[in-house]
Image (cartoon, rainbow, N blue to C red):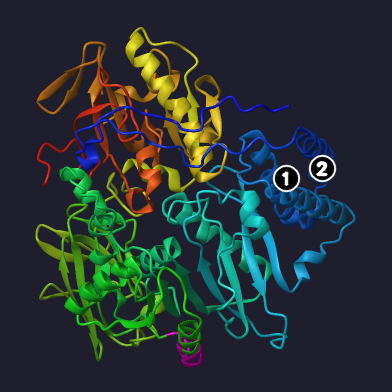
Amino acid sequence: MRSIICLILLIFSVQFAFAQQKEPIEVRRVPAIGIQIPEADEKELETGLQEFAKTISQLKLKQDKFTASLLPDVLIYYKAIDYALKYHEFFHSEEVASAKKLLQTGRQRAVDLLEGKAPWTTQKGEVVRGYISKIDGSVQPYGLSIPENDGLKEAKYNLSFWFHGRGEYLSELNFIANGKGFFPAMPALKNTIMLYPYGRYCNGFKFAGEVDVQEALAAVKKQYPINENGIFDRGFSMGGAAVWHFAVHYPDFWLAANPGAGFAETTEFLLLDNETLRPNWYEKKLLHLYDCTDYASNLSNLPIIAYNGDKDLQKQAADVMEKAMKQEGIPLTRIVGPNTGHAYHPASAKIVDSLLEREAAKGKRPAPKAFHFTTYTLKYNKMYWLNLDALKEHWEKAHVDGTISSQTITLKTTNVLALSLAPEVLSTVINLKKPVTINIDGTNVKLKQPSVLSFYLENGNWVQGTAKSTLVKKHELQGPIDDAFMSAFIVVKPTGKSKNELFDKWSKAELDRFLILWRRQFRGDAIVKNDVDVTSADLSSNLIVFGDEESNKFVLKIKNKLPIKWDSEKIKVGDTAYSSKDHALVMICPNPLNTQKYVVLNSGFTFREASFLNNAKQIPMLPDWAIVDLNTPPGPVYPGKVSKAGFFGEDWKWKSKQSR
């Protein structure tokens, strides 16, 4: 029998520095340890799971594309039950019956697939499916509602995301069984598939949860005919927060957005819980990653219908976004449920639905001839026909006012070093077969090659072409540390031992902690390899390396090629040296052995247990590098006392002057 040997609460007694609390705090575990289910039920499920595994093994032996493409639809059921048993994630007694039902459904799918059948692929109504994630190779579920009346025949479906609310008990088991989060009172849009992403549990659909949304959509597109111009961005509560973040970061992707309640930034929202956030200088900069108010200018061409109950404290999200949008000259349509708290009022739901149907009838708005684009990071670097390729300085506001008049494209930039224009989109608003004038920051740029629409700043002048190939921050290679966990990564485990016992104990504890928290919070088992087993093929993934040159052979291989140097005596950070005896270096930078991918030293994702209690606090807590004082034990906020931290320059080199 799998016995529960863990405490109900995981307690940390540390200073909560991020919120400047003076007293030690207790942090409850998320998700909580579940209940002990009856031994007979546990044994029945384990036996059934063993039989299920045998059929899955048979399926894996088949080499045909049909089986391989549909195997994730089977594996989601195995994982849901396996995780619930292995990690004590039965939270209520009725979940046992759900597990038995899911086991039956999963085994039936496996038998059907073994026989070359897959009846669920043509099923109408609600159906749960899965995909294999590029991030860690884990299988992830997603829910669908397929219209019963398939009157489209050869036409394509519109698709509406519905992002679920916060649910600390939303295990895979509960998500598949009944937790997708759409409200029964809300009518379905016509000829529209509803897509309910799991989002890898309860992270506000950020980080790996954000990638889950993209991967789930890609999976759906392989299985169903989807209208690329008919995709809606919708959700409520935590899901409403997700709507705002996807709207401002991908504004040209959606037909319309419908955020319900939720939050749109961190600092003001936390005041609702009487929590005052006092971030240090780099934490304040990193708030720009997901603070949607900072990106309000991007919403000028996207229909947004915001909903909240009149008595819902989370109306604050629409309040702050309305204010930010008004400053950009953008109105916000708001529907308010009368005498309603944190819920969707049935009459209001019908109004929202009718407004969305109206937008669907009009169709997605075309790319505009004028817009105002804002970003703080090349992670989110494009809108319509404009791509930003390099910034002067990350985490400072970058802005472009773009207009097209006749055959002239005028761009006014702030904090931009290189940009390009997307011809496939640009051709819809200007005739590229005729001569085009490009004016950037008041100067006409001479077009030596009309087909080349890339430009960069050289000696204060904009010129056509791309800058000389050097190592620079760019889209998907811009940091901070947390960015490494939004694409494929491999954890490189040390096989040796450092002579520095304090560091060795800390680094190995941080590795163990990361693997546990990745599984709990992002619902996958990270791929782990020993340092001696890393191959050239592994260099195509981000490498998350723990240890030092004595304990980890991969660190020894790259140590002298990294932007911060250290030896057994000191870690040299600019003009300051820190003792290696009781300090550790945490860092992200391009891997010297493949500069198109990251290497991370001694860190997992940087928000820790205290952030799990509120989705608005699931934000980056460390920048590109940090020096950690090991005399202070790790806690639920930081990996120790952060003595110093900062960002690398745009060339990924040490930067002496940090803009604050």
Q: Amino acid at mark 2?
A: Phe
Mark 1, Cα crowd under 10 Å, few <14 / some 14-19 / many 20+, is many
Instruction: Give the residue displayed 64% in from the left and 54% down from the top.
Output: 131
Q: Which mark is residue 78?
A: 1
Q: Provide the residue span drawn in magenta.
A: 355-364
Residue 95 in percent (x, y) is at 68, 49
- Identify the disc placed on residue 52: 2
- The prevailing secondary structure element of the residues shown in magenta is helix
Given contact means CB atoms under 8 Å apart, are the residues at marks 2 and 1 in contact?
yes
Q: Quadrant of residue 399?
A: bottom left
Residue in the image at 51% along x and 92% along y: 361
User: In this view, which residue lies farthest toward the front?
Assistant: 339
Q: State the residue in front, 132 or 431.
A: 132
| Location of residue 210 in the rendering, given as x and y in whole percent from the top left corner | 45, 56
Pointer 2 or 1: first along the chain: 2
Q: Secondary structure at mark 1?
A: helix
x%, y% of residue 84? Answer: 65, 41
Residue 646 seen in this snapshot = yes
